[in-house]
Image: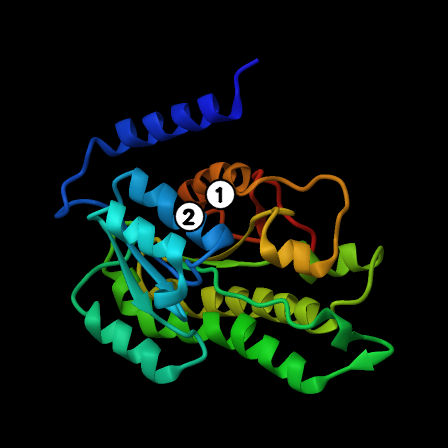
Amino acid sequence: MKSASFSRTITLLVGALLLSAPTAADAASILITGSNRGIGLGLAQRYAEMGWTVYATARNPAGADKLKALDAQFDNLTVDELDVTDDVEIATLAKKLEGKSIDVLINNAGMLGDITKQNAENIDYDVIKRIMEVNVYGPMKMTKAFLPHVKASEQKKILTMTSGLGSMTFTQRLGRFYGYRMSKAAVNMAMRAMHADLKGEADGLVIGLIAPGQVQTELLFASGFRGPGSITVEESIDGLVGVIENVTAENVGPPVNYNGEEMPW
């Protein structure tokens, strides 16, 4: 049986061969929000290893030691400060990258919020409001601000990270997490509506939804969930890279999980 490290090595080698060691001038590019840890950090590292131009963002880059280490390791990765709820910071980064194409924008930044304040016994609407600002309004603002950069690229993909907790089908089995669930259901609808409105602005434009699975990250642990089926960050990234590559304007639809399966609404 091949080890996980062996499989990951093969994945990286295949990715490198497919990209044919691109130069800085012709490399594909990706902008990832929330790159300081978990899925965002993993995606930033993987795409940097594959030779892409990576624009990684975090609210507090100075405190993101692992992201700073990637910045030092890869010449094709840059780090910028970005709070997806801050209009000024979004506009500043969009201006900084003006004239640069972005093949893939990953709206990954998100928050779970205090889970003790998102249930029938205790609802804190300030907590829920903050979750909505980050998980719904943030991706919408990023999509609008960076649409010109994406339209100018070859791949033209804007993908927002969603969750099974936003599925009404899955909610029949488990409640709680009101704010987080609401935010993911809302961002699903927002991205579907934006795709319907904006797809005609550029041939091949994709505004879609992807999901990482139940990944062993700080967010999952903070939720208190310890059910079966959780996967490592590397396993999630392995699948997500393929999902991101395969999504097109012709097949964009419901959220697609890291394993390629569509997620029920």
Under circle 1, the secondary element is helix
Front-most of residues 110 and 220: 220
Total count of labels: 2
| Amino acid, disc 2 | Leu
Viewport quadrant of the C terminus: bottom right
Q: Residue at x 55, y 53 (%)?
A: 253
Q: Position of residue 158 (x, y in %)?
A: 40, 59
Rendered position, 252 above or below 188: above
The quadrant holding residue 136 is bottom right
Q: Position of residue 189 (x, y in %)?
A: 59, 68
The residue beneath circle 1 is 240
Above or below residue 129? Residue 54 is: above
Asked if one can make out residue 104 in the rendered structure from this viewpoint, the answer is no
> In the rendered image, is residue 65 in sight?
yes
Which residue is at the far right? 121
Q: Is residue 230 above or below residue 60?
A: above
Q: Nearer the viewer, mark 2 or mark 1?
A: 2
Disc 2 or 1, which lies upstream in sequence? Answer: 2
- Where residue 254 appears, as percent x and y from the top left, is 59, 53
Residue in the foreground of this view, choosing between 212 and 79: 79
Disc 2 to disc 1: CB gap under 8 Å: yes
For residue 43, which numbered disc appears in the image? Answer: 2
- Horizontally, is 104 left or right of 183 in the view? left
**Is 92 or 159 nearer to us in this picture?**
92
Residue at the image position 14 percent from the left and 46 percent from the top: 24
